[in-house]
Each structure stands twice: as structure tokens, then as C-alpha cells.
Amino acid sequence: MSQPQPIGDNGRDAIIAAAADCFMEAGYDSTSIDAVADRLNATKGRVYHYYRSKAELFYDVYRRGMVINLSTIQPIVERDLEPREKLETMSKAHVRNMLDHLNFQRVVMQGVEMHLAGATTPAQRQQLASLMKERERYEGLFRQVLVEGRQHGVFRFDNASFASKAVLAILNNPVLWYRRRQDAAHDGHEEIVEEFTRYAMNCVAATQT
Amino acid sequence: MSQPQPIGDNGRDAIIAAAADCFMEAGYDSTSIDAVADRLNATKGRVYHYYRSKAELFYDVYRRGMVINLSTIQPIVERDLEPREKLETMSKAHVRNMLDHLNFQRVVMQGVEMHLAGATTPAQRQQLASLMKERERYEGLFRQVLVEGRQHGVFRFDNASFASKAVLAILNNPVLWYRRRQDAAHDGHEEIVEEFTRYAMNCVAATQT
DNA sequence: GTCTATAGGCCGATAGAC
DNA sequence: GTCTATCGGCCTATAGAC
């Protein structure tokens, strides 16, 4: 208690990180608790000491992913920027998060899939629903900027909900195909960030840039 | 042999349709062969008579989904249309397919996820890789129109591969949240088709419409 | 707090009757 | 061609030693 633990140093954080990698590489269903434990050079006794079930572990990984995203975007929303510049800054930061935290972002995607598929037990359903609310809140941050920009005449669209979905569909896309490169100096991140941000901006732009 | 069987009437087609519904509702891993058989009012002996494994059944469902998409879009590609009109026609048809064949389209999405996750056995890997080629061919039809339009100065983008991914990311998006409505007369399809097509067009447009 | 050992259930796949 | 019956493996979760 004398010092705060750095992230990744206490029991749970190491498990969350290992689980994120496993879920990314094999998917939720195909990841066994043994596999997560193996990655920690431990056995599943350790995992079950911190988590009551595999589902709870998954939820924690998902939540960590959303915390990364929200804590990046929220401060940008609060800055006093003109709508176009604000959306552009948010978009670039979002794509960077996708590329920098692929493991967590793939887990977030799997959470959406699980929600679509419909979890079996009522308890799981409820848990997933609350996770989806976090995601909707995140989408709301984008929707809010879009509506503001439409009032200023710099964005154009009919249905704000559809527009925010379209923008995020573009910005999330790299998660579906990007693979980490060995050479960190030439990871190609900036080209992806620039280009997908431009597509996202264009799709709701009222005036050509 | 005297008459061709209508789709959905021979043994395999009924199984494919039942499996598509199950995979949509529960996901690949959580769908048991018993569940597919139940939906057919049969037992799994029937399924295993036509398919050697659950994976093969999945591949067939996926293929059916891609056949739906390719057979819709290919004829449009071959028509003699100006690039902007061609892309618009393709986009609308694509979104309609997403809404009209949700079950198969969700399976196609799951196939992409499985590919990302990395199938376990070498045989599965190879099968999935060949399915992904179909998908890339489909994306290529869009890329081709985009490049043609860029030459005519009606589209603008740097990387044609990224541009086609961005366009399809938008057009696929409804699969992630759309749910069938009871009232077929007011299914809301046309609003979704119009709006997401417009976003897709805008994101690569060289001139404002 | 981390381990070993094992219970217990589910499901893919097969064998063989009809 | 469809059924019933069952094997065998895998994996979640728990019990209890250290």
C-alpha cells in the first residue's frame, strides 16, 4: 500500500495481458485457461485465484481495452477545438490505439461478436450488455462531435447514429487485417493513420478538402 | 436427375440453411451439431451423412455466402457504366445482400475472425486460406472500379487497397447491428441502403455531390 | 498465493441397426 | 439415408496440499 503498483506488475494485470494475447491469437472459445497460465509460466490455479471464471477474465480484458480508448478520446473531446479539427484529432488517436493495442482491440471486437451471438446464461447476458453500454458511450463521443459539426455546417449526414457507425467502421477496419511488423521503425502506422482518418473525414464532410 | 432441384430442397441445402441460422445465433464454437440437427427436426446422423466434420459444414455455409455476394456484384461490374454510377449500384446491391441474407453474412464475418485467430490444424489453415481468397477476389471487384474512377478523376485516394477496405468497412457495417424486424413492409432497409451507400461514395469522392 | 489432482459435463465423431 | 448408442477427448472449475 505504500506505493501504487505500476500497470502490469500486480497479479491481475499480468493475467489480463496474457489473456489479451491468447484471446487475440486463438479467440475466446479456443483459448483454454491452461493456455493463459502457460503464457504466464504458471498453472491455472493462479488464474482461478484472481478470477472466478473464464468469462469474468474476458470481461476484464474487454474493459481494459475500453479504458484505453476512452481515456485517450475523452480529453480530446473536452478540448476547445473547431469540430473538423476535433474529429480529425480523435480519429487519428483512435486508429493509433487500434494499431498500438491490437490484442485488446481484437478482444473488444470479439465482445461485439459475442453480444451478437447472444450469450447463453442470463448472468452473462447482463454482463455483456453492460460492456456494450461502454462501447455505446464511446460511440456517443464521436456522434456528439458530428452533430456539433453539422450545426456549424462543416459535416453533412442525415442520421447521426448511422454516421457515427460509418466513421467508426472505417477507423476500426485496420484491426481486421493489420499484423505487427518486426521492424518497429518502419511499422507503417502513420500511413494507415493518415489514410483511414481521411476516409472517415470525407465520408461526413460537407465541403471538399 | 429429370429436374434440377430448387435450392433448399436437396439434402445439403437444408443443412446449410439450418447451419447458417445456428452459426448466426450462437457462433461457430457454441453451435453443436446436435443443434443444427434439431433445427432440421433430425439427428446428427443426418448431418454427418453429408459432412465429414463441423468445419466442412462451416466452409460450405461460408462459400454459399460468398456465392450470393459474387453473383450479385459480378454482373454489375460487367455492365458498361460510368465509374461513379457503377460503384453506387454495386454498393447498394451489397448492402441489400447484407440485410437480406444476414445469417450467411454473419458467417462470412466469423470466417474472417477465424482466419485472424488462426485455425489449429494445417488442413484447416489451408481451407480457410482458400476461402479468404474468394473474399479478396470480391474486394478486388470494388478496387477495380475505384482505380478506374480515379483515372477518370471522379475518385480520389492514395492506396487503392486501403480505399477498397474503407468502402467495404462501411457497407458491411449493418451486419454488426441490424436485426430483422417483424413487419416486412417497414423493414427500414431502404434508408440503410441509401445512407451507407452515400457514406461509402463520399469517402472516396473527388468532387462533392 | 500457487501448486497438483481430479471431478464432471459437453460435444465431435464413429459404429452399426433399420 | 436416417436413426440410436456410445466412445473418447478436452476443458472449466473445484478441492485441498504446501
Image (spheres, coloured by chain):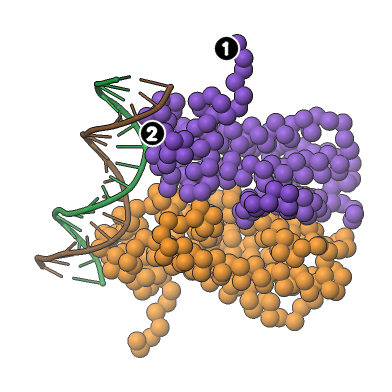
Chain colours: A orange, B purple, C green, D brown
What amino acid type is highlighted by mark number 2?
A: Thr
Residue that appears at 64% across and 52% down: B182
- The quarter of the picture where residue A81 lies is bottom right
Cα distance between the residues tagged 2 and 1: 27 Å
- The quarter of the picture where residue B135 lies is top right
Question: Do the residues marked 2 and 1 share a common chain?
Answer: yes
Residue A161 lies, with reference to residue B184, above or below; the image says: below
Letter of the chain that mark 2 sits on in the rendering: B
Going by the image, does B205 lie left or right of B132? right
Residue that appears at 62% across and 53% down: B179
**Which residue is denoted by mark 2 in the rendering?**
B43
- In the rendered image, residue A103, in percent from the top left (x then y), is placed at 49, 58
- In the rendered image, residue A147, in percent from the top left (x then y), is placed at 77, 71
Q: Secondary structure at mark 2?
A: loop
Q: Nearer the viewer, residue B32 or B67?
A: B32
Q: From this viewpoint, is residue B197 visible?
A: yes
Residue A89 lies, with reference to residue A182, above or below; the image says: below
Q: Nearer the viewer, residue B118 or B66?
A: B66
Quadrant (top left, top right, bottom left, bottom right) of the N terminus of chain B: top right
Residue that appears at 29% across and 65% down: A48
**Which residue is denoted by mark 1 in the rendering?**
B1
Residue A70 lies, with reference to residue B52, above or below; the image says: below
Q: Earlier in the sequence, mark 2 or mark 1?
A: 1
- In the rendered image, residue B144, in percent from the top left (x then y), is placed at 77, 37
Neighbour class for label 2 at 10 Å: few (<14), some, many (≥20)? some
Q: Nearer the viewer, residue B23 or B120?
A: B23
Going by the image, does B139 lie left or right of B152? left
